[in-house]
Amino acid sequence: MANDKKNNESPLKVNRRHFFSQLSVGIGSLALGSLLIPDLFKSDTESLSSMPLGIPHFAPKAKRIIYLFQAGAPSQLETFDHKPTLRKRMGEDLPESIRNGQRLTGMTSEQKTFPLMPPAVEFHQHGKSGAWISDFFPHIAKIADEICIIKSMHTEAINHDPAITFFQTGSQISGRPSMGSWMSYGLGSENKNLPSFVVLTSRGKGNSQGLYSKLWSSGFLDSKHQGVLLRSGKDPVLYLNDPDGISRSDKRHLLDQVSSLNKLHHVETGDDEIESRIAQYEMAYRMQMSVPDVMDVSKEPESIIKLYGEDCQVPGTYAANALQARRLAENGVRFIQLYHQGWDQHGNLHNEMAGQAKDVDQASAALIMDLKQRGMLEDTLVIWGGEFGRTNYCQGKFDPKNYGRDHHPRAFSIFMAGGGVKPGITYGETDEFGYNIIENPVHINDFHATLMYAMGLDHEQLTYKYQGRRFRLTDVAGNVINDLIA
Amino acid sequence: MVYNNKNRWFDYAIFGLTVFLIFCLLFEQYIELPSVVAWLGRWHPMVLHFPIVLLLIVLFLGLTGRPIPRSLFVVAVLSALVTAISGFFLGTESDSKGELLVWHQWMGAGVALISVFWYTLDGVGLGQKFYSKALQIVLIVLIGFTGHYGGMVTHGEDFLALPLNKKRKAIPENPMIFADVVNPILDQNCVACHNPNKKKGSLLMTSWASLLKGGESGKTILVGDSGNSELIRRLLLPLDDEEHMPPDGKKPLSPDEIKILERWIALGASDTVRLDQLAPEESLVGLVKNLMEPDPLVKWADLPKVADSTLQNLDSDYVTIERVSGNSQALRIDVYLPPVYDAKAITDLKRIGSNIVELDLSGLPIGVEEMAFVASCANLEWLELDRTPITDAEVEMLRNLKQLRMLKIYNTKIGDQSAAVLKEMENLKRVYLWETGLSSAALVELKLKRPNVLIDTGIDEETKAFFVATDTIAKIEDK
């Protein structure tokens, strides 16, 4: 209950009539209650949910997360799920026993046959762990022993918007807080001069779907937990800069005046939102200094630029964002969310995926190696993946030269690195068609529960009461996958 | 004291039971008890409380020279006999008596017989003689020991050991999986009931050989097949299942402990295999490594208390102070570069210095003053000093940080002298020191001296070269 909004209980919000009516019922029920339930007035200090916010429930493995979201859903069959059977049985119809009533999207529901399609690229085993990784990702393959591949992710959503909303907020229906907001709410900020949840976006040449700011909204949580979109270019945060002609000391003066008025108002009403507003003005003021500083990559040495690839000097590219992500993590941002659009390969899969992979492969691997050499992989969790998988059959008519894959929620692959996750393992298994999970399924709720566990939070205890119901990121489900935790 | 007829019947009963008890003890090997009698033995744990209390009352009266009500004395002695006999019956149920049980049996019989003897002395008016008093003192001591041994038989030998001694021994480097990991788990949770004194289900868990031998229902461990091993099956049963082990609401094994036993059996239940002989992706490796890490919350329990208000006072826009978790007294501190830097922001933290376990000063223009503060934080385990102007002299100041596990000093001006300090940091596990003045010779020597420390000297040249040379998509051959 300690997590509920305090201002609803502000003593100043109670008027005289309210006070007396509550008092008479109150005293009677207190007496009755204590008779019936002897423990009624014992406080349960042991309960995690009564702990103060902003502190992990238990010693965390990770202090921050960098989520490299591949929006549009990269095909598991061209990334990490190696299925030679598909090559052998190319063109054959997907057996009904395998499809087993799986719902189809509007794009393939009219299709009469579901011809199996081979992987568009060769796979090889890499590292000591012998992980199968497609040739689209030579750099990630190079660091195979640093990453933990999960081949058994599954979701219920089958279209982009509900699926990505599910991944980001734990619900297919918009309106819930984003996972970054939950982390910010549960753990507070590490650096008071930067937002604790930052979003960076980039776009590849592949077929893309929209990204909406609801994905990083704080929902019903305090707006200070909202993700802040950092834009490339000279104005990384909108409306942060002072208007022309206003000096920094003018600004300081203005803030002090506004703040003293706000404080007066706070004394009158006791509304905590006012304090939160004062704090946000102050933070924006400090961010005017800190954000440009963090965003300035000009001091990065040549060797780092080479590592991430020359692209990282071009603002707005995935590589630039990846480098930026490291700098933000170094400066104590809790949750850094990258989105790279363009992974929706309904057609022309081979060429589009090659292009998309080129955008992200080197920079993703470089980020992991860069974090590693800085000792940051010890306490930073990196996640790479999309919102669902893709079908093993082709969308549209069978053409081995140019084909696409439709959406597939039943099994797909992601990978993680660092932050207390076991390096160099592949978790979960799918059947020979790459269609159904046969071992160690990981649902999105499980994924969220596991991330929270890594961050030192108990997903069942971090709740927020809104409209009479306590909400969690994992809603009413989710199990921590202990096998993934190092 | 006058004898009346009623008392006589009690005396006959006492005499009869005494003879029966002596008979039982003498001819133990030859006795085959019918099951009903054996069932009577089950009452032993209940009746045994009567003679302890009654005899102690009688003893108190006797030793303080007060008159002992004869009826009380009779009941006390009778209950002692009944308890001893029922205990004997119970003992016949276990097929081989351990040392503890034998001691318990003979001392218990001693208590009964000595009390009978004293009762007789008291009956003929010799109760106040000095040898009678001596007898009473012997009786008190004997009751105590009998009870204690009985307790050890039921609850395990270390039941009364101080909790401190019960703490699991630290696991050595590269442990033997059975001796250092599996056995302590069984020792702590199972051996209380599965030992020579108390061989429940005829299963002995005191050694590797006896464990593999199995119990009543045969082998409880099927080597290589944990899924079908009786032992694992019982651990995984629902808590309220009668067959769940350990039974009756005793603290169940943790999921990790069960997994360790499972994997150990699956891998062949060997008693010789060591940690480094397992494949790195084997999940047992991670489980064991977790056990080897001391539980931080236990370790930090002794840190001095620090109030939230103190933390709030020291916290500022550029200094973030957090408790490591929940209500822990251990602190993590991050300091960021303010527009105007002042060493005071750091040195002010001195008040809570001994609570700081993690400190991040990376990228700050720190000098000697700040380093003196750092050196005074005796409980530091995690220290980030990368990208600071420190040199060998400052690293030298860290010599006394005995708890330090992780140190980041990359991108600094330190030189070879720092290697000497690093060599001596006993608890150091990981150090990041690329782009420093350390010569490669010093690094090689350091790595040799500290083979168990991860010494990160940056991304290796081969990987770096690969990243520089390889364009992501080499060449896509059209199929």
Image (cartoon, grey):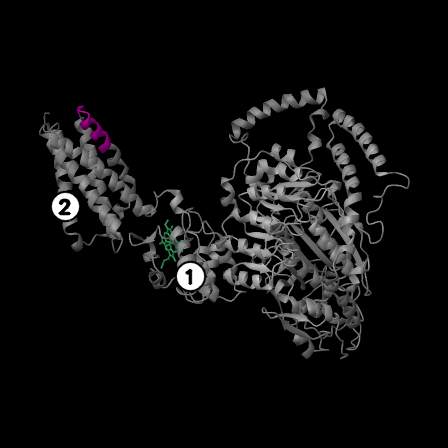
**On the rendered image, what quadrant is the N terminus of chain A found in?**
top right
Q: Amino acid at mark 2?
A: Ile
Determine if residue A466 is in view. yes
**Residue, far left:** B124
Secondary structure under badge 1?
loop
Judge whether A39 appears above or below A441 on screen: above
Residue in the foreground of this view, choosing between B24 and B479: B479
The quarter of the displayed image where residue B333 is located: top right
What label does residue B22 carry, if any?
2
User: Residue at position x 91%, y 39% from top?
Assistant: A245
**Magenta region includes residue A200:** no
A384 left or right of B426 in image: right
Q: Which residue is mark 1?
A: B176
A421 left or right of A315 in image: left
User: Residue at position x 67%, y 42% from top?
Assistant: A188
Label 2 packing within 10 angstroms: few (<14), some (14-19), many (20+): some
Magenta region: B55-67
Residue in the foreground of this view, choosing between A392 and B265: B265
Q: In the rendering, at what x and y percent does residue B181 appear?
A: 43, 57
